[in-house]
Amino acid sequence: MKVFKFGGASLESVERIRQVAQIVQSFPDEKLLIVISAMAKTTNELEKVAQNFFLRKREIAAQLLFNIEEQHVNVAEALLGTKDHPLFIQLQQFFTEAEWTLGEKPLRTYDYYYDQLVSLGELLSTSIVSAFFNSVGIHNTWLDVRDIFRTDDNFRDANIDWIYTQRQVTEKVVPLFNNTNIVITQGFIGSTDQNESVTLGREGSDYSAAVFANMLDAESQTIWKDVEGLKNADPKLFPNTVNIPEISYSEVIEMAYYGAQVIHPKTIKPLQNKQIPLLVKCFLDKNLPGTIIRETADVKLLPPIIVLKKNQVLLNITSKDYSFITEDKISDIYEIFHGLKVKINLMQNGAINFSCCIDNNPEKIELLIKTLHEQFKIVYNEGLELLTVRYYQTGLLEELSDGHTILLEQRSTATIQRLWKR
Ligand code: ASP
Ligand code: MG
């Protein structure tokens, strides 16, 4: 059994969905569990529906939803060549449910409504792909993952109940493969014990696929992307990037942690725990070698890995009365950051001072300052960039830093980080 994941970019157009079908057809006798995310930018569009609904701008929300419906119906019709197909009834039902939500008074939290509406994207895309595959002879079974993935009610970032979910996988998913080689299901979503839809965090489909791979003891997971594989830097930001043929789980976790938008950071653990290799392949040309991520990858083969995080803020927190900022104070500060779910990307402390670099989120920063200002004086500096280089070489580092004012730097034998102003 193999687990495949296809993301939004692979479903961006009718042509691309046909390409996805060709990929799947090239694995004729394989048992495949295929996890699919929402088409192209649908999740972003659905976020706007949720925002407008919550602001009680119902008409705008309804119009945006209608646009999404039209796009999906058009794609489905182009793929199937007809509108006379049960798929269109299924799509209609999903939209009717979403319209019911829009008809409610928003009495619960924003995050709750967000999940009820945004989860629609994956239900639509998987239904369309499943119906299309069946119509071209790729026989498959569509599965509503909300019957399998049980989570808590931490809406927008729900946590999987591993024991319950494993039981569902064993009792409900495994037997499906007695009658079918291919199961198609949604990434990114799940459900609470009250049958409320949840989402697992943006870009969470990679993680959904990894949970399935773990629970099905899959031989591998493949993430099909529109790029060659993992690269040592984002080609949109840096020239001369190179493909990484193999890399270890721990290295990928580090890359994701430092901000590389390669693979959802939660994806690695379920795979590492069962030593399931993760392949990153290009659906535009499946003969390209791609990247293999596994425990035994050889670090010596790695080029310097470069990650640049933009839009960073440096917060300088100084005690007002000259009391030391040592362990107890640092733990208070961390508790505040933790409470507001603000991740610290880099930190350094002195006698009466604590500096840290965080993503620029104006609302969170305002809350942080409000909470901290009683005890501390706070100064902040925005518009910064945080560079991280693993396996750095001095020449490269100087080239990258050229002309920038470095505000903070930290280095270990393997990693250097520089926070700078351009
Ligand atoms: N559709 C979701 C998102 O755009 C999940 C995913 O793509 O993995 O965030
Ligand atoms: Mg995506």
Image: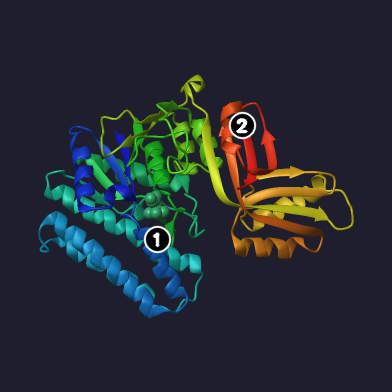
Q: As shown in the figure, which amino acid type bears the numbered disc 2?
A: Thr
Instruction: Single out the mark in the foreground, 1 or 2.
Output: 2
Label placed on residue 415? 2
Camera-side residue of 85 and 348: 348
Q: Residue at x 15, y 48 (%)?
A: 134
Q: Residue at (13%, 55%) from the top-left corner?
A: 80
The x and y percentages for residue 63 are 32, 75
In this rendering, the answer to whether 63 lies above or below 292 is below
Q: Quadrant of the N terminus?
A: top left
User: Considering the numbered disc 1 on the image, is that residue within a helix, a strand or a loop?
Assistant: helix
Q: Give neighbour class at mark 2: few <14, some 14-19, many 20+ (Cα, 10 Å).
A: some
Q: CA distance from mark 1 to mark 2?
A: 34 Å
Asked whether residue 184 is in view, the answer is yes
Within 8 Å of ligand 1, the CB of disc 1?
yes
**In the image, is 63 to the left or to the right of 137?**
right
* Residue located beneath label 1 in the image: 44
Is residue 295 or residue 238 the one in the foreground?
238
Q: Residue at x 20, y 49 (%)?
A: 15
Image side of residue 180 versus residue 365, left or right: left
Q: How many marks?
A: 2
